[in-house]
Image: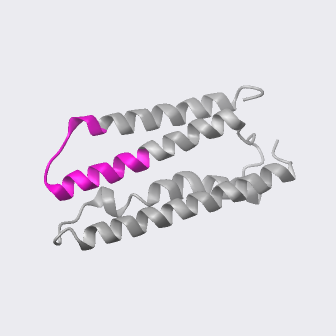
Amino acid sequence: MYTSDNSRDLAVRISVNYLAAALFCALFGAVYEIFSHEVYSYPMIYAFAIPLAGGALPFLAFSAGLLKQWRFPGTISRSLYHAGIAALTIGSIMRGILEIYGTTNMLLWAYWIAGWLLITGAVIATGRPGL
């Protein structure tokens, strides 16, 4: 059960970090598209939503006590989750860059596969004691 004040403080710090990452992605996308000669890419525009919805909101929910029925994730679970969110965010930005450039690359799927595998591993590890 989620009762520890330390876990609450940690969840708040993690949420702030994810909010900063979302802000950085939004600013990066805006600046990149200013210099892209009016070529736009939805993966670039909405890359900020991944750290916002996938990172900041769940940890804000933990800090607010809205997820009392769930255990706060341990170190390994959090690390896997953070890596998964990072992979999805970077994959979205890379896809946006390539779309603006006017090309594609099949290797971009590796970001999405790795991201979802890491997030799935984090969810599985959260259910185990001590992880």
What residue is drawn where x is 43% and y is 62%? 25
Is residue 16 left or right of 119 when viewed as pictured? right
Residue 69: within the magenta? no
What residue is drawn where x is 47% and y is 31%? 117
82 or 113, nearer to the observer = 82
What residue is drawn where x is 74% and y is 42%? 72
Task: Name which quarter of the figure residue 121 lies in.
Answer: top right
76 or 71, nearer to the observer = 76
The furthest residue to the top = 128
What residue is drawn where x is 46% and y is 64%? 24
Is residue 23 left or right of 123 when viewed as pictured? left
> x, y (%) of residue 91?
36, 46
- Quarter of the image that includes the C terminus: top right
> x, y (%) of residue 114?
42, 33
Would you place residue 2 above or below residue 17 in this image?
Answer: above
Would you place residue 48 above or below residue 127 in this image?
Answer: below
Would you place residue 10 above or below residue 72 in this image?
Answer: below
90 or 67, nearer to the observer = 90
The residue stretch that appears in magenta:
88-108
- Quarter of the image that includes the N terminus: top right
Residue 102: within the magenta? yes
The furthest residue to the right = 4
Task: Name which quarter of the figure residue 77 lies in.
Answer: top right
The prevailing secondary structure element of the residues shown in magenta is helix
Would you place residue 80 above or below residue 18 in this image?
Answer: above
Is residue 60 left or right of 68 when viewed as pictured? left
